[in-house]
Image (cartoon, rainbow, N blue to C red):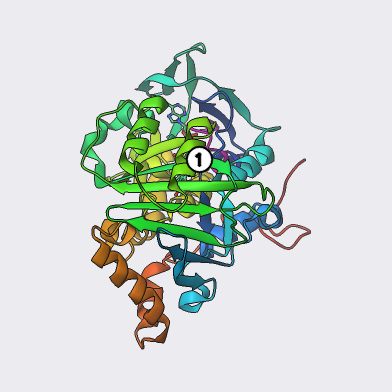
Amino acid sequence: MKNVLISGASVAGPALAYWLRRHGFTPTVVERAPAPRPGGHAIDLRGVSVDVVRRMGLLEEARRVAVDCRGMSYVDATGRRVADMPASFLGGNGVVGEVEILRGDLVDIFYRATGDEVEYVFDDTITSLTQTPDGVHVTFERSAPRVFDLVVGADGAHSVTRSLAFGQESRFSRELGCYVAYFTAPNVFDIQHWDLFHNMPGRKVAALRPSRRPEEAKVLFGFASGPLDYDHRDTERQRQIVAEVFAGAGWQVPRMLQAMEAATDFYFDSATQIVMDGWSRGRIVLLGDAGYSPSPLGGGGTGLAVVGAYVLAGELAEAGGDHAAAFAAYEREMRDFVRQSQKLPPGGVNGFVPRSQLAIRMRNLSIRTLPHLPWAGLIEKAVNRSDAITLKDYGLTATPFGEPGITRSR
Ligand SMILES: Cc1cc2nc3c(=O)[nH]c(=O)nc-3n(C[C@H](O)[C@H](O)[C@H](O)COP(=O)(O)OP(=O)(O)OC[C@H]3O[C@@H](n4cnc5c(N)ncnc54)[C@H](O)[C@@H]3O)c2cc1C
């Protein structure tokens, strides 16, 4: 059970490859893109996911490149701040994660930590999976067929591994009625360590400034919508959809739309949760968004992927070759954490994109008054669910650095 194929080289795939190497497995990662994909907004690492990155020996590096975010504000159409949430808001556990890092930077750190020891095959995808008693026979779009002991689908909410092994996406996806787009734009917003948000009924725009690249801003567009008809790979059509939805909007939106046309890291997707009764079929198992995406609205997808990678590799090592026992233990350990992380923040989609001007004003008012209310602590608990799992050590001994798992051979 040593040769493991992982589909997807974003967060979950390289994190799993790291832990599998540490436990003595031989992972191969296949990624459809020609290189690790840059792009995305800032993502949160909190609680146990910070602990896993620390055990990887990569926490210092993650902190070094982290976004120095000191708070968030909602602005009106003229740019005037109407509701502020400093990092200390909700006891310091609400709006800013322990490590707030650009998704692309985290992917880059995980990739560089594994790139010398792990075989990465870019620009390719699995086309068929056939399980036999001796392994999984895999065919690819470009590479020659190969046999692996195990296959892990870490290829996101629209996972091809899941479609091939478990059935079509619609059986497992819960569309939340909302779409998001992310891209990099020139920093014309005068943002200094502070994220800015602007809501219009059913629509939202956010901009943040990465600390190390002050000339750049990371932009998010979000909007409520019924199912849209578009091809996942047709980014021109996706840009057109966003431009139409945000036409005529105020604040800095026209400049952002202009920047979107030139952006090389444009990413667009529906806000989708993946909910499954089981994450494995024989020798094939799912990890991260492929098996249990909480959607970008919940914000916990990266933490789940990082922790899931640690647990899956650890259980495989502990089961000593019995993949069925390992997959069952992985599910047992992760199930409650996943269930908690898939609970949407208060208000759900309507909290993300309030549907009327009145609802936007009420939300701004509640942000201004919330810290003074006696039940603020309860809301803080509802927002922060990052500790709903206790990590095992999986036999990794302490290193000279005093942390389990940091036995890097390079
Ligand atoms: C470019 C990009 C930007 C993102 N930006 C944000 C963001 O700003 N905020 C947020 O909350 N979440 C964002 N996400 C999602 C976020 O990364 C995940 O929710 C979370 O980190 C869990 O990661 P994952 O590795 O399970 O899945 P994902 O990050 O979705 O990664 C899946 C990987 O699999 C690859 N892949 C897909 N199909 C195939 C295939 N057939 N064969 C091989 N590889 C395949 C994809 O190219 C991707 O690299 C983004 C994802 C991507 C890919």
Screen quadrant of the C terminus: top right
| Quarter of the rendering containing residue 199 | bottom left
Highlighted range, magenta: 1-15
Q: Is residue 102 above or below residue 364?
A: above
Would you place residue 55 above or below residue 158 in this image?
below
Res 388 seen here:
yes
Tell me the residue at 39%/60% (across/down).
337
Identify which residue, 377 or 179, lies in the foreground.
179
**Residue shown at 24% from the left, 47% from the top:** 177
Residue at horizontal 62%, vertical 60%?
192
Would residue 238 be found to the left or right of residue 169 on screen?
A: right
Reading the image, the residue beneath label 1 is 183
Position of residue 64 measured from the top left corner of the image (x, y, whole percent): 71, 55
Of helix, strand and loop, which one carries label 1? strand
Depicted 360 relative to depicted 160: above or below: below
Image coordinates of residue 174 in percent, x first then y, are 24, 45
| Rendered position, 214 above or below 381 | above
Between 203 and 377, the one nearer to me in the picture: 203
In the rendered image, residue 169, in percent from the top left (x then y), is placed at: 27, 34
Viewer-proximal residue among 391 and 292: 292
